[in-house]
Image (cartoon, rainbow, N blue to C red):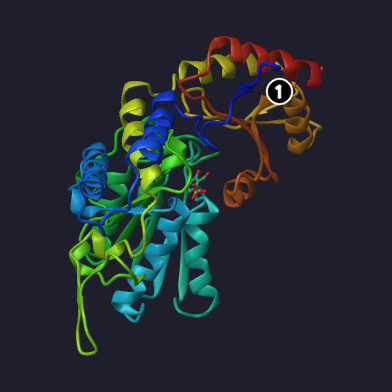
Amino acid sequence: MKEIVYLDAAASFLKPESVIETEADFLRNRYANAGRGVCARAAAVDDMVAAARCRVAEFINADAHQVVFTANATDGLNRIVSIISCQSGYSDMSTFAVSDLDHHSARLPWQELLRIGKIDKEHICELDSDFNIKIDSIPKTDILVVTAMSNVIGVPQDVASIVRVARKKNPNVITIVDATQYVVHKKIDVKKWDCDFLVFSGHKIGADTGVGVLYIRDPDKYWPDKFGGGMVMRVSDSELVLNKAPEKFEAGTLPLTQICGLARAVDELESHRPDLSLIKYAYDELSKISRVKILTERDAAVLSFVVDGMHPLDVGAMLGANNICVRVGNMCASWIHQKIGIDGSIRISVGPWNTMHDIDKFISELKKIVK
Ligand SMILES: Cc1ncc(COP(=O)(O)O)c(C=O)c1O
């Protein structure tokens, strides 16, 4: 088989061997449902889920009851909209604020509310020339969505300051952090950030697809958005008593195998973060190719670029034909591309498996394409 150079960690991380082994062992030897059985095997699965939750909580400096397992970041971001609506019906909300750093998953659920007339106004926070959210452009708003690191630009935002300013302007603001890219590269401290909600996907940090994390700062304040098995303590025609958080937000069978792998992936990520000196090296080498225009900073977590006179999809297809896997197109982040004035770009991103040799191979193939 030909050597594959996978430079697309930001789209989805390759899985560490230990995650694959952990999941295979669970499926082969330990599988049972959680929260429903009384036998020792089922109890062991309950313990596994509880331990995984604690591990994730520790990872982001949360308490275990604030950690809800979802399907992925997109699921979490959409569920936040539903959870807030279950509590208030948006009756006391009129504005939301976003920025051009957002992924479609972070902004579209709110724009949909605008479209159907459930919310009145969208505010776009401004970016400075380094793609940082301008703190002085944060408005008085009911909802604030913060992308902690753009998947195109790869710059960490000062989430704590952004949240602080938003709260100064409106003490009741609900702050939502999309940490899907940030979590790969930097330690998250939800207590320091003081956000109300935060999400990320398991598959971007080396866990399987199908599991994500939703942090809720005050889970007792909210009514659940989904109903079914596992979230009810007592129900009759006249009463409904819910389980405490986080279970009340987890109706239905959880993605158990993926949760098992997620805890392992967190361990792996904390001991092997992607080596961003590879991005710097790629930046230096790409800078020497005259037709290449780099969009990102040398110390960013990803490297996005365009090639003068070539469509990004063509560049991606040609690299792909030579076994170099990169991400091309609008990357589900249309607004930042519109702001830069282009339709799409080409992105490389690295994981712990990548080496200098991978970057050399990428540069050498790109040079053949660009000439
Ligand atoms: C910043 C950001 N937010 C949200 C998402 C959505 O993640 P998922 O497709 O895993 O739900 C992505 C995926 O690329 C992303 O980069």
Quadrant for the N terminus in the image: top right
Report x, y in % for residue 58.
Answer: 21, 38
Mark yes or no: residue 161 visible.
yes
- As rendered, which of 364 and 262 lies closer to the eye? 262
Q: Relative to residue 297, is residue 234 drawn left or right?
A: left
Report x, y in % for residue 107.
Answer: 49, 59
- As rendered, which of 186 and 245 lies closer to the eye? 245
Report x, y in % for residue 339.
Answer: 60, 48
Is the CB of mark 1 within 8 Å of ligand 1? no
Report x, y in % for residue 174.
Answer: 30, 63
Q: Residue at x 19, y 67 (%)?
A: 243
At label 1, which amino acid type do we have? Asn
> For residue 82, which quarter of the picture?
bottom left
**Is the residue 8 above or below the residue 90 in the image?**
above
Mark 1 Cα shell of 10 Å, populated few (<14), some (14-19), many (≥20): some
What residue occupies the far bottom of the structure in this picture? 238
- As rendered, which of 215 and 191 lies closer to the eye? 215
Q: Residue at x 71, y 17 (%)?
A: 289
Q: Relative to residue 175, is residue 332 drawn left or right?
A: right
Q: Residue at x 59, y 49 (%)?
A: 332
**Residue located beneath label 1 in the image:** 323
Q: Relative to residue 54, is residue 208 drawn left or right?
A: right
Mark yes or no: residue 149 visible.
no
**Is the residue 207 above or below the residue 299 in the image?**
below
Quadrant for the C terminus in the image: top right
Badge 1 marks a residue whose secondary structure is loop
